[in-house]
Image (cartoon, grey):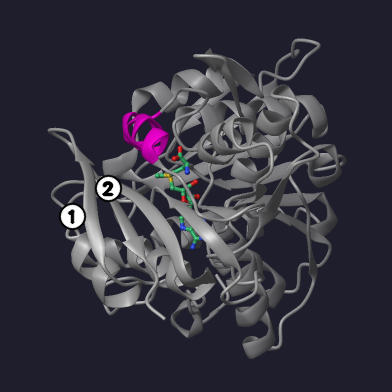
């Protein structure tokens, strides 16, 4: 294994903290695997490379023509930033699809959290990569389940888990099987007249998440003292909040934005399925960074939350700070969050006066008015 310095990598612009690093042992195992058999770089595709560790280590070892897909725009920006800092090139970025995989014989994958996303990736490799392609998927042992092997076995004839090393494990899937004519995603579900569409990596799939539902119910009390309100669904997922708002407020100008490409593709499908694709703009962006300051009358926010690790509250707080930046003075952010999270303090501090609109045993919805 060439001595690539993984420690030089950064997560920026994603949340950084002393207990968070930009690579893990799985990246190192995947890199070692790829460098073993002498596969040329233009036959290698990398999926789920969080901050560029796999791609940059392979490029640093002399591979060129590697194709890379990262779902999160923060990961894409981190890869570009790390590549510039290290002076490494030799890869091209691709959206998820045939373009990423055509001609690929070795696909390296950091296992996604959601089984649906793994199912979508396994299908895509069997569908679009070379007929003799191998998918090498790796993860942290504590996050791996037998269900992942089962999902892989639906698209590959041979699925071989490898011995765990440094708390990570690779699964080697080979001999791709025949695929059905239509890809398995997007999936669709209708909820009280609202159709949600989801690709594999989208939050909650095509279901209506319970927190989202609580905010949607609370939004019935929402009335804005402006005509043609400018509305941002910040972290839109499948676009439930943006679509519901646009359907009930035909004069509103709505932007739905997310850092996940899978979410963005899903939200676009959702808008089309509800006949409002011309009225809701969907963008791939990190915390609305490309939207102008003080431009929104209303921000709808269902921030990501993770139990436990306090550092993860950083992800929600990033979006609260973004809401504060995006709102016009007097504009409002309506937020839903798990009641045990202390987002109300951050909302009062960063946005302005914050009141509770509703509270269920699990979720709280607040309304915060942007101070002048
Ligand atoms: C809890 S989900 C809510 C999805 C949707 N708004 C709903 O209510 O069903 C949070 C969403 O925020 C997105 N997200 C997290 N961090 C983000 C960031 N920095 N910029 C944009 N979107 C982000 C995630 O990808 C995810 O889709």
Look at the numbered discs 2 and 1 and tell me whether their residues touch, using CB distance below 8 Å: yes
- Could you say which is closer to the camera, residue 61 or residue 266? 266
- Could you say which is closer to the camera, residue 31 or residue 364? 364
Which disc is residue 362 wearing? Answer: none
Q: Which residue is mark 2?
A: 337
Q: Classify residue 78 by image quadrant.
A: bottom right
- Whole-angstrom CA distance, mark 2 to mark 1, is 7 Å
Q: Does any portion of residue 23 appear in the rendered image?
A: no
Q: Is residue 165 magenta?
A: no
* Coordinates of residue 183 in the picture (x, y in percent): 73, 20
Image height of 282 relative to 268, above or below: below
- Could you say which is closer to the camera, residue 54 or residue 283? 283
**Residue at screen point 57% across, 26% down:** 119
Image height of 34 relative to 91, above or below: above
- Could you say which is closer to the camera, residue 138 or residue 307? 307
Label 1 SS: loop
Chain part drawn in magenta = 209-221
Q: Classify residue 210 by image quadrant.
A: top left
Left or right: where 111 falls relative to 31: left
Q: Which residue is mark 1?
A: 341
* Coordinates of residue 329 in the picture (x, y in percent): 47, 74
Task: Label the magenta part by its dominant secondary structure.
Answer: helix
* Coordinates of residue 72 in the picture (x, y in percent): 58, 56
Label 2 SS: strand
Instruction: Classify 10 Å Cα crowding around label 2: few (below 14), some (14-19), many (20 and above).
Output: many
Image height of 194 relative to 124, above or below: above
* Coordinates of residue 269 in the picture (x, y in percent): 71, 31
Q: Quadrant of the C terminus?
A: bottom left
Q: Quadrant of the N terminus?
A: bottom right
Q: Classify residue 93 by image quadrant.
A: bottom right
């Amino acid at each position: 294994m060439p001595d690539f310095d993984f420690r030089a990598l950064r997560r920026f612009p994603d949340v950084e903290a002393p207990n968070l690093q930009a690579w893990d042992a799985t990246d190192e195992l995947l890199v070692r695997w790829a460098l073993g058999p002498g596969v040329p770089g233009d036959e290698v595709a990398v999926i789920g490379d969080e901050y560029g560790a796999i791609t940059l280590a392979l490029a640093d070892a002399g591979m060129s023509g590697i194709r890379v897909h990262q779902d999160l725009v923060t990961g894409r920006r981190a890869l570009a930033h790390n590549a510039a800092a290290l002076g490494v090139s030799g890869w091209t970025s691709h959206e998820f699809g045939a373009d990423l995989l055509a001609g690929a014989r070795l696909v390296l994958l950091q296992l996604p959290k959601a089984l649906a996303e793994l199912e979508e990736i396994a299908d895509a490799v069997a569908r679009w990569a070379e007929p003799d392609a191998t998918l090498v998927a790796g993860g942290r042992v504590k996050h791996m389940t037998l269900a992942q092997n089962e999902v892989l076995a639906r698209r590959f004839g041979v699925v071989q888990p490898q011995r765990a090393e440094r708390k990570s494990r690779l699964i080697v899937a080979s001999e791709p099987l025949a695929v059905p004519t239509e890809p398995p995603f997007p999936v669709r579900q209708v909820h009280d007249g609202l159709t949600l569409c989801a690709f594999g990596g989208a939050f909650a799939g095509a279901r209506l998440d319970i927190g989202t539902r609580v905010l949607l119910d609370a939004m019935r009390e929402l009335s804005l003292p402006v005509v043609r309100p400018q509305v941002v669904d910040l972290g839109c997922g499948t676009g439930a909040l943006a679509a519901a708002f646009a359907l009930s407020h035909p004069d509103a100008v709505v932007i739905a934005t997310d850092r996940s490409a899978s979410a963005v593709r899903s939200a676009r499908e959702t808008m089309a399925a509800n006949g409002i694709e011309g009225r809701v703009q969907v963008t791939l962006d990190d915390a609305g960074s490309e939207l102008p300051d003080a431009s929104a009358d209303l921000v709808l926010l269902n921030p990501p939350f993770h139990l436990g690790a306090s550092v993860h509250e950083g992800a929600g707080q990033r979006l609260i700070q973004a809401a504060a930046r995006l709102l016009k003075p007097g504009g409002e952010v309506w937020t839903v969050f798990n009641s045990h999270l202390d987002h109300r303090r951050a909302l009062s501090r960063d946005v302005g006066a914050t009141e509770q609109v509703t509270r269920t045993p699990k979720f709280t919805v607040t309304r915060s008015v942007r101070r002048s």
